[in-house]
Image (cartoon, rainbow, N blue to C red):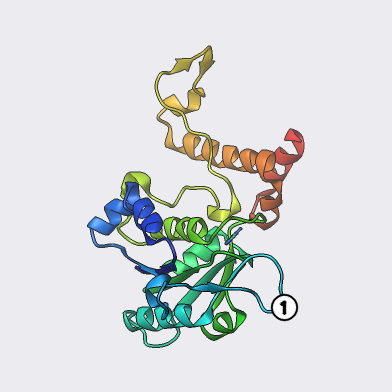
């Protein structure tokens, strides 16, 4: 997976990606990162990339031309010569989800466009953007943190990035259920004991317990997810009994 990021703050992207699992994945060559400063594509003395909005109003707008020139350079580095996804991070976008992360993980290259100020000239967005994506219904100062959120979620789905222990198959949102609660040593902490089934070593009982806890956790914390989950009649009754 090759990530390309158009941003005014490439060091913010690089610094965050360099650590932890994404850093390890870059060193191992499972993912690559190319964060490019849009300012380098300005064509004026002071490298300005923003200007006043037509029609007036507060704030500045990023100009179309430097964004477009930056995009043209990046797209040359992508494997496909057409159809590369260009993701614009914006509160106007579709709210990001695990299933979108799964779709993006299938791509070879992804280009992210991070805005700042009051936005980007609409004409270049029309020209290059394929996907508008939001990370939630709130407004951030720029698209860098959302781009990092997407890259993190996508990276861990790229084959080889997670090791067995970190593997992605029993985690939250698989089958539209949240993950069951986890415990580690000591067996008793602050008067609270680890559920005895976890010490039993009985795989059948364990699997049943994990499933039951996933259903209960989802019913308690994210009941909206249950609409899309496939539940047995017994599990539906379990939920009714717990609410
Ligand atoms: N840019 C500013 N706020 C954002 C959000 N919530 N999601 C994606 N991009 C943004």
Q: Quadrant of residue 116?
A: bottom right
* Residue at image point 28% right, 62% down: 30
* Residue at image point 70% right, 46% down: 223
* Left or right placement of residue 158 versus residue 119 in this view: left
Q: Quadrant of residue 93?
A: bottom right
Near-viewer residue (209 or 109): 109
* Left or right placement of residue 167 versus residue 176 in this view: left
* Residue at image point 36% right, 57% down: 11
Beta carbon at label 1 within 8 Å of ligand 1: no
Ligand 1 visible in quadrant: bottom right
Q: In the rendered image, which quarter contains the N terminus? A: bottom left
Q: In the rendered image, which quarter contains the C terminus? A: top right
Residue 33: horizontal and vertical position, in percent? 33, 64
Near-viewer residue (207 or 1): 1
Dot 1 crowding, Cα within 10 Å, few <14, some 14–19, many 20+:
few
In the image, is residue 204 above or below residue 157? above
In the image, is residue 101 above or below residue 205? below
Near-viewer residue (242 or 234): 242
**What residue sits right under mark 1 in the picture?**
55
Residue 46: horizontal and vertical position, in percent? 42, 72
* Residue at image point 51% right, 72% down: 87
């Amino acid at each position: 997976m090759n990530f390309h990021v158009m941003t005014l703050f490439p060091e913010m992207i690089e610094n965050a990606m360099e650590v932890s699992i994404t850093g390890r994945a870059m060193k191992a060559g499972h993912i690559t990162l190319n964060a490019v400063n849009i300012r380098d594509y300005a064509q004026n003395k002071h490298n300005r990339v923003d200007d006043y909005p037509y029609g007036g109003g507060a704030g500045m707008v990023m100009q179309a031309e430097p964004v477009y020139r930056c995009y043209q350079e990046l797209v040359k580095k992508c494997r496909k010569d057409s159809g590369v996804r260009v993701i614009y991070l914006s509160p106007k976008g579709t709210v990001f989800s695990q299933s979108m992360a799964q779709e993006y993980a299938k791509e070879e290259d992804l280009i992210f466009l991070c805005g700042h100020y009051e936005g980007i000239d609409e004409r270049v967005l029309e020209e290059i953007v394929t996907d508008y994506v939001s990370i939630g219904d709130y407004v951030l100062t720029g698209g860098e943190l959302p781009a990092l959120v997407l890259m993190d979620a996508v990276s861990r789905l790229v084959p080889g990035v997670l090791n067995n222990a970190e593997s992605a198959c029993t985690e939250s949102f698989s089958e539209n259920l949240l993950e069951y609660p986890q415990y580690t040593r000591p067996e008793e902490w602050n008067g609270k004991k680890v559920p005895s089934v976890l010490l039993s070593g009985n795989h059948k009982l364990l699997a049943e317990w994990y499933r039951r806890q996933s259903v209960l956790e989802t019913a308690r914390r994210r009941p909206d997810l249950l609409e899309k989950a496939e539940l047995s009649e017994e599990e539906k009754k379990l939920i009714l009994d717990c609410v």
